[in-house]
Image (cartoon, rainbow, N blue to C red):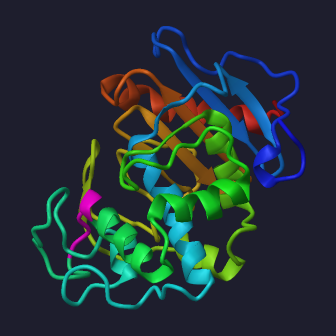
Amino acid sequence: MPSGGRGAVWDPGPVATDLIPADAFAFACALGVSDADAAVHVEGDDRAVWPLASVSKPIAALGVLMAVDRGLVDLDEAAGPEGATVRHLLAHTAGYGFDGEDVVARPASRRIYSNTGFEVLAAHVEQATGYDFPDWMEQTVVAGLELPDLDVEGSPAAGYRGSIRDLLAVGRELLTPTLIPEPLWREATTVQFPDLSGILPGYGRQKHNDWGLGFEIRDHKEPHWTGNGSSPETFGHFGQSGSFLWVDPPRGLSAAFLGEEPFGSVHQENWPALTDAILTRAEQGW
């Protein structure tokens, strides 16, 4: 990797390769862990490109937040259904259903996870910036983090493709932001529209289905795809392609998982233990 950019940091050094139990994930996959400066652990092919599915959303959200920082978009300007704003779209509270343009709730009345919301959000940013959304993403996030493998031509809701080294570069950015100012980062990773219930796909109804601006916030959700030892402040996303990216700010760690099997029971059963193993290894100093 060339030196110089935030995304170019990739020198895990000598690391153990025993965090992924072969009997649990009996398919091609890759795992990476990074602190704020560099990768500290990697298993599998860090350069293999996989579908990110909904892990596309936090990356697209970072592009939207860059438009906010540049004054081209305002979080509280109208976007989407009547009464909704950019903030609502990012926080899955605009009222759209999962897919399709039907509005099924009033803004901020329910947390309804929505692919449509991110499609509408991208169209709004296109109008505000004058760029096609993939071009905006290329010029801001991809170039800003020097992401070598990330393909942003697909849907911002679930169509991106990338590698572990891409996701860990994003994770480092979300630990110590350089593309957006810290106050905006803090707002994005703080619960928006608190105390809303909703369904977390794959894990059922959560009484407090907390989200920030494009990032799911762990808080005390149970069950959950992160670990039992994860900080409540942990945020990130997982995808139906069998992908995840989480950021645990109190521990100064980020981790990513990609593989060839779509999300299913093997992920539900083993991802939490895998995250707890990462946290334990970090406490032991790798």
- Whether residue 228 can be seen here: no
Residue sitting nearer the eye, 1 or 186: 1
Residue 101 relative to residue 209: left or right: left
Residue 282 relative to residue 47: left or right: right
Verify whether residue 41 appears in magenta. no
Q: Residue at x 79, y 53 (%)?
A: 6
Screen quadrant of the N terminus: top right
State whether residue 88 is above or below residue 45.
below
Q: Residue at x 9, y 68 (%)?
A: 102
Residue sitting nearer the eye, 44 or 68: 68
Q: Main secondary structure of the magenta part?
A: loop
- Whether residue 151 can be seen here: yes
* Number of marks in the rendered image: 0
Where is residue 52? Give x, y as percent: 45, 40
Where is residue 56? Give x, y as percent: 45, 50
Where is residue 200? Give x, y as percent: 29, 52
Q: Quadrant of residue 112?
A: bottom left
Q: Which residues are magenta?
A: 110-116
Verify whether residue 112 appears in magenta. yes
Where is residue 14? Give x, y as percent: 87, 21
